[in-house]
Image (cartoon, rainbow, N blue to C red):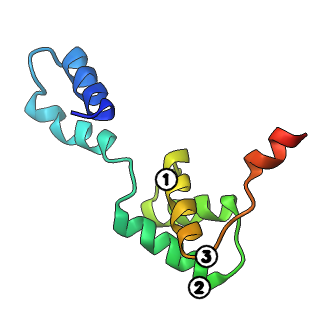
Amino acid sequence: MNKFLTKVVNWLRAGYPEGVPPTDTFPVLALLSGRLSTDEVKAVANELMDRGDFDHIDIGVAITQLTDDLPRPEDIERVRERLAAKGWPLDDQRDVEETE
């Protein structure tokens, strides 16, 4: 098991030592599904490439429009990586902050 999955399992065991009751199954699954699927990453990246002009805030807005949830930093990064792989490197705000 990878570290992320181990943390999830440990979290579930701590919160539900007797097992997840049927009434909590769907809410727990909803909490765990906060990551964009590969198809959603592709959809966001394609929408932004079609637009042609965007930054990290636009990535977050596009994710929010697709998922109806606030974007997670990990998902923004996955979209950034997808865009970079397709030849759309973005200015990285982290580089600017480090040099200041």
Q: Say which element carries label 1.
A: helix
CA gap between label 2 and label 3 equals 13 Å
Q: Which residue is drawn at 44% across and 74% down?
A: 43
User: Which quarter of the image is occupied by the N terminus?
Assistant: top left
Q: Residue 50: which numbered mark, if any?
A: 2
Q: Please name the amino acid that badge 1 sits on.
A: Asp
Placement of 99 over or under 24, stated as above or below? below
Single out the mark in the foreground, 1 or 3: 3
Q: Say which element carries label 3.
A: loop
Neighbour tally class for label 1: few under 14, some 14-19, many 20 plus, Cα within 10 Å: some
Residue that badge 1 annotates: 75
Residue that badge 3 annotates: 87
Q: Please name the amino acid that badge 2 sits on.
A: Asp
Residue 80 in percent (x, y) is at 58, 61
Placement of 73 over or under 17, stated as above or below? below
Q: Say which element carries label 2.
A: helix
For the residues bearing labels 1 and 3, Cβ distance under 8 angstroms:
no
Placement of 50 over or under 57, stated as above or below? below
CA gap between label 1 and label 3 equals 19 Å
